[in-house]
Amino acid sequence: MSDYTPLDEISTIRDAVKAGFASGKTRNVAYRKAQLLQLAHMVKDNAEQMVSSLREDLSRPRLEAYFLELGAVLKEAMIAYKKVDKWAAPEGVPFSITTSAMFGKVYKQPKGAVLIIGPFNYPYWCTLTPLIGAIAAGCTAVVKPSELSSASMKLLVELLPKYLDQDCYRIVTGAIPETTKLLELQWDHIMYTGSGMVGKIVAAAAAKHLTPITLELGGKSPVIVDKSADVTLTARRVLWAKMANAGQTCVAPDYILVAKDKHDALVEALLETYEQFYPKAEGGAAESTSFARLVNQRHFERVQKVLDRTKGEIVAGGETNATTKYIAPTIVKNVSLDDSLMEEELFGPVLPIIPVDSFQHAVDYVNTRDHPLALYLFCNDHKVKASVLEQTQSGMAMVNDLIISAGVEGLGFGGIGAVGMGAHSDKTGFEQFTHRRSTIHVPAWVDLLMKFRFPPYSSRKESTALALLMPSVPRGLSGTSSFNWLLWGPLIAIVGAAAGVLTKKQAISSGK
Ligand code: NAD
């Protein structure tokens, strides 16, 4: 494909961003802030073009483009811009009577030249949010967007060089051969977002160079609806979160586990909401400008096939059109746990509803599967909430709402187990690309206190070492504390005071 980066140029591009890192310019936080602002301007200036590209790739409604993607990227860029000085500042260590004189500090060093690989479903958020983390951390980067959302990919190819420093931030386009070539090269970190199957390929390639990775993968995110839930609110929020981007959202609710005695009420509320969202009188979802399409024929057929095999009862939607890659928002009730819809991540606009005996039954089922990326709970009972959150594990958990936690400042976005490792968004993005370098700077006089470490060893030195190095341990199951505070307490206090005085003297004499 002529739109793809020639294979023989890929290592040159990698070498260029390595050289960009070696030049040292990204160490400067003011430079990083200037690049973050450039990225924010890139989104602001070209938002309407980005909206058009999302429409071309996914028939994404304009509001969804802003709400779920462009606004979120802009917010990330501005948070990083405002906070990077603080994030990048060295951190002191807690006071310790034995080690404070060594001036321990953690310096936040950028890892180096990093690779960011993105999926098709959120082509801007899933590439630019990691890039924001990389820029903030002081890394240089190559971004490889998905070839499936080709209009968005092409726009990124056009825009990135206009706004970002080409010595440090580059784009490579392509499919499997180009990504394979990228993965053969050594990187200082790889952040990959996409399917678990390709995630394993990325992890194996990274292992060859012992490269650290962040994996943002997909899975089946359950919704547990307790008998205490408000079904109208549940129906409105779940149907929106499921059908946004035609179900092609990594944290889309995949299926509902609902308490048996709420099943019918929830289905009824979902049907009412369905009519409000996609009114029949206006042509339903097929004519709606508020509903996207599947990205390509392969994904269309994948979803259609699982839908064809379901033994559940389709109560809304079910219509499909291969030419327009349209699968109607579809609600399937009375689905059993061994149904076709429960095999893989659906990643399409199909919502299975499974009646369960109780919230505990739902929890037990969720715990038989891989940990989900997001776990959703609808309930108004604090005990149930505490119990579900306590008994389950997931990348993220949301109570009485879905998807939008990524928009909450201070929260990271990431998985656990089969849905990934590491996180991005906000400070977590900065942290993924940062090495916390532990340093000490030890004054000469510390040898007065630590002389015991130098040979020849003696029993006196040993006693001093034991007194300093073997602190008391609180009484536990296995016995009593072995430390004699009456004996060693006053000595430690004297040593600590002496260390304090000497540290102060040194600071005064060195003018600090
Ligand atoms: P995908 O794995 O098919 O592709 C992702 C990237 O990997 C693309 O850039 C593609 O070119 C590359 N790729 C594909 N096959 C490859 C191979 N064999 N070797 C090397 N590289 C290869 O994923 P997708 O279909 O674009 O995205 C959908 C998946 O991503 C869903 O499972 C979804 O849940 C997940 N996802 C996860 C998150 C998250 O944050 N956890 C976000 C968005 C999407």
Image (tube, rainbow, N blue to C red):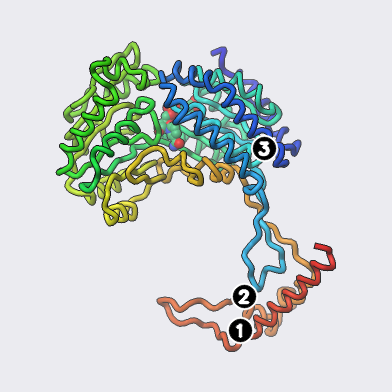
Could you tell me how far apart the alpha carbons at marks 1 and 2 are, in whole angstroms?
Answer: 13 Å
Please identify the quarter of the rendering in which residue 396 is found.
top left
Query: Does the Cβ of the disc 1 residue fall within 8 Å of ligand 1?
Result: no
Figure check: 370 above or below 460: above
In the rendered image, which residue does mark 1 sit on?
A: 489
Which amino acid lies under the numbered mark 3 shown in the image of this protein? Lys
Give neighbour class at mark 2: few <14, some 14-19, many 20+ (Cα, 10 Å). Answer: few
Image-based side of 270 in relation to 135, left or right: left
Considering only order in the chain, which callout, 2 or 1, is on the residue closer to the N terminus? 2
- Whole-percent x, y for residue 175 in the image: 51, 22
In the rendered image, which residue does mark 3 sit on?
A: 33
In the rendered image, which residue does mark 2 sit on?
A: 469
- Whole-percent x, y for residue 241 in the image: 35, 33
Which of the two discs, 3 and 2, sits closer to the camera?
3
Q: Which quadrant is the N terminus positioned in? A: top right
Could you tell me how far apart the alpha carbons at marks 3 and 2 are, in whole angstroms?
Answer: 44 Å
Query: Does the Cβ of the disc 2 residue fall within 8 Å of ligand 1?
Result: no
Which amino acid lies under the numbered mark 2 shown in the image of this protein? Leu
Give neighbour class at mark 3: few <14, some 14-19, many 20+ (Cα, 10 Å). Answer: many
Say what secondary structure mark 2 lies in: helix
Please identify the quarter of the rendering in which residue 313 is found.
top left
Look at 29% across and 34% down and name the residue there.
236
- Whole-percent x, y for residue 397 in the image: 38, 46
Image-based side of 431 in relation to 33, left or right: left
Considering only order in the chain, which callout, 2 or 3, is on the residue closer to the N terminus? 3
Q: Nearer the viewer, residue 372 or 263?
A: 263
Could you tell me how far apart the alpha carbons at marks 3 and 1 are, in whole angstroms?
Answer: 50 Å
